[in-house]
Amino acid sequence: MEKYLFMKKVIDSISQGDFFRKAFAIFLRVLALVITITGLVAWVMIWKTMSGETVKMVAGIVIFQILFVFALYMVVHVLLIRAGQIAELPEGDYTVIPIASVFFKLCGEMYASFAAIMSLAGGVLIWFVGREAFYFIGKVSIFKYGFLSGSDFLGGLTFIVGGWLVAFFVLVIFYFLSEAVVVMTDIARNTKKGK
């Protein structure tokens, strides 16, 4: 009868840190693939809107698209690096906490790298095409802070600098969360030793 009741083996394998590390690393690699495909679809959608546009618009979109591909590369590369680090985490007292710490850093790094490059791309596009830039920015970006800028040179500059400031702030917040998880773990470990 014991061989038909398999859940004890399943629970025992899930309880091992190795399972969570490998599963989460696989999840991040799959997420990198999904982001790559989604990004390439958005990239193609932008190109499809270019027929019959002015030279100024096309020049702005070409620069925007090059920077978008660079931002996409940075996000995917960060995902793959952190997936490898999670897979290689050592065995410890806690299973999920070290993964959560790395994951918080990953979230900040992904957002900051994408936002920094897309802010630059958006600012340059504003310089070329004015307010129409927000249509293209909205096609490839989850963040929208059009309230930060107008449609002139100063508006583009404000969009770039505002995006960089937001990216840095988000990075700091996620690094803080990562360190807070580690500090809570250290407190728990020291409390356990003190008993």
Image: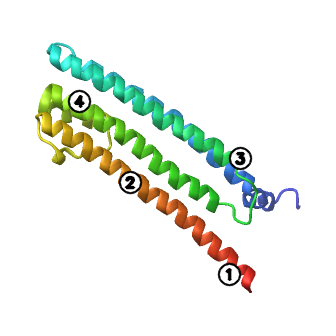
- Kindly identify the amino acid type of the residue bearing the numbered disc 3: Glu
Which image quarter is the C terminus in? Answer: bottom right
Tell me the distance, in whole angstroms, between the alpha carbons under discs 3 and 4. 40 Å
Tell me the distance, in whole angstroms, between the alpha carbons under discs 1 and 2. 31 Å
Which of pointers 4 and 1 lies earlier in the amino acid sequence?
A: 4
Residues packed near mark 1 inside 10 Å, few (<14), some (14 to 19) or many (20 plus) = few
- Kindly identify the amino acid type of the residue bearing the numbered disc 4: Val
Residue 135 position in % (x across, y down): 20, 33
Q: Nearer the viewer, residue 170 or 1?
A: 170
**What residue is pinned by disc 3?**
88
Q: Residue at x 19, y 43 (%)?
A: 158
- The answer, for residue 92, to whether it is visible in the render is yes
**Tag 2, which secondary structure?**
helix
Residue 169 relative to residue 81: left or right: left
Tell me the distance, in whole angstroms, between the alpha carbons under discs 4 and 1. 53 Å
Residue 177 relative to residue 45: left or right: right
Determine contact: label 2, label 3, CB under 8 Å.
no
Up/down of 46 relative to 140, above or below = above
Determine contact: label 4, label 2, CB under 8 Å.
no
- Kindly identify the amino acid type of the residue bearing the numbered disc 1: Thr
Up/down of 108 relative to 71, above or below = below
**What residue is pinned by disc 2?**
170
Which of pointers 3 and 4 lies earlier in the amino acid sequence?
A: 3
Q: Residue at x 74, y 80 (%)?
A: 193
Q: Nearer the viewer, mark 3 or mark 4?
A: 4
Residue 99 position in % (x across, y down): 62, 55
Which of pointers 1 and 2 lies earlier in the amino acid sequence?
A: 2
